[in-house]
């Protein structure tokens, strides 16, 4: 898998997510006859597809932090994460998880560049940090997309 394939798949995933979010927004604009707000099957299906696409594309897009932009993106996301923590928003989980998911890319590069890298502790630490970031992103997206409407 080349870097071009990864970047094209990230781009296609984000475009599909944007289109589905736009469709979901249009579905919500339709007037509801009764005062009871109920999630329809189509709306729930679109939310699930957006959830799955973002859960895979956000950790994979950490490949875009490769290089000097890592030193800009990481502090900005940690500052945003702290900001969202004080606002008690689930976006803080995504902001903290995105830089941590870079560990998966680091393990991927090490696996292809070094012999017997999988037998070293550094590989498993990178996998653990990356998996923690992916789990934080997943939990944050779950809380944002599937929160219950309280009245």
Image (cartoon, rainbow, N blue to C red):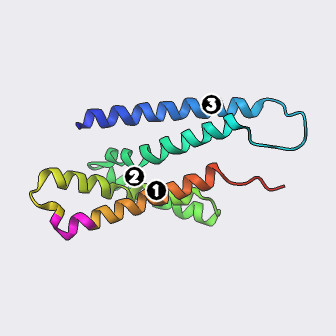
Q: Residue at x 54, y 60 (%)?
A: 92
Q: Determine which of the numbered discs, if any, sits on residue 77 in the image.
A: 1
**Marks 1 and 3, how far apart in space?**
25 Å
In the picture, measured across the screen, residue 113 lies left or right of residue 32, that is left
Mark 1 lies on a secondary structure that is: helix
Is 48 one of the magenta-colored residues? no
Cα separation between marks 3 and 2: 27 Å
Q: Earlier in the sequence, mark 1 or mark 3?
A: 3
Taking the spot 31% from the left edge, 55% from the top edge, the residue there is 104
Task: Give neighbour class at mark 2: few <14, some 14-19, many 20+ (Cα, 10 Å).
Answer: some
**What residue appears at the point 30 percent right and 61 percent down from the top-left corner?**
127
Left or right of 104? Residue 94 is: right
Please rate how many residues cluster around mark 3, counting C-alpha atoms within 10 Å: few if below 14, some from 14 to 19, many from 20. Answer: few
Where does residue 122 sit, x and y in percent of width and height?
21, 67
In this view of the protein, which residue sits in the foreground, 124 or 15?
A: 124
Q: Main secondary structure of the magenta part?
A: helix
Question: Is label 2 in a helix, a strand or a loop?
Answer: helix
Local packing at callout 1 (Cα closer than 10 Å; few below 14, some 14-19, many 20+) is some
Foreground disc of the pair 1, 3:
3
Residue 121: say if magenta. Answer: yes
Judging by the rendered image, the residue that carries numbered circle 3 is 22
Residue at image mark 2: 73
Q: Residue 48 appears at what percent x and percent y?
A: 58, 42
For mark 3, give the secondary structure. Answer: helix
Name the residue at the right extreme: 34
Percent x, y of residue 38: 79, 43
Q: Quadrant of the C terminus?
A: bottom right
- Real-space Cα distance between discs 2 and 1? 6 Å
Q: Is residue 30 above or below residue 127?
A: above
Q: Is residue 13 left or right of residue 111?
A: right
Which range is magenta? Answer: 119-124
Q: Is residue 124 left or right of residue 37?
A: left
């Amino acid at each position: 898998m080349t870097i071009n394939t990864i970047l094209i798949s990230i781009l296609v995933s984000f475009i599909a997510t944007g289109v589905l979010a736009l469709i979901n927004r249009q579905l919500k604009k339709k007037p509801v006859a009764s005062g009871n707000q109920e999630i329809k099957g189509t709306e729930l299906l679109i939310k699930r597809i957006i959830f799955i696409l973002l859960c895979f594309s956000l950790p994979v897009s950490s490949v875009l932090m490769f290089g000097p932009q890592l030193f800009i993106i990481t502090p900005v996301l940690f500052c945003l994460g702290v900001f969202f923590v004080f606002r008690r928003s689930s976006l803080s989980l995504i902001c903290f998880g995105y830089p941590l998911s870079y560990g998966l890319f680091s393990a991927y590069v090490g696996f292809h560049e070094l012999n017997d890298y999988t037998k070293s502790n550094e590989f498993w630490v990178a996998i653990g940090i990356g998996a923690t970031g992916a789990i934080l992103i997943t939990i944050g997206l779950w809380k944002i997309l599937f929160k219950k409407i309280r009245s």
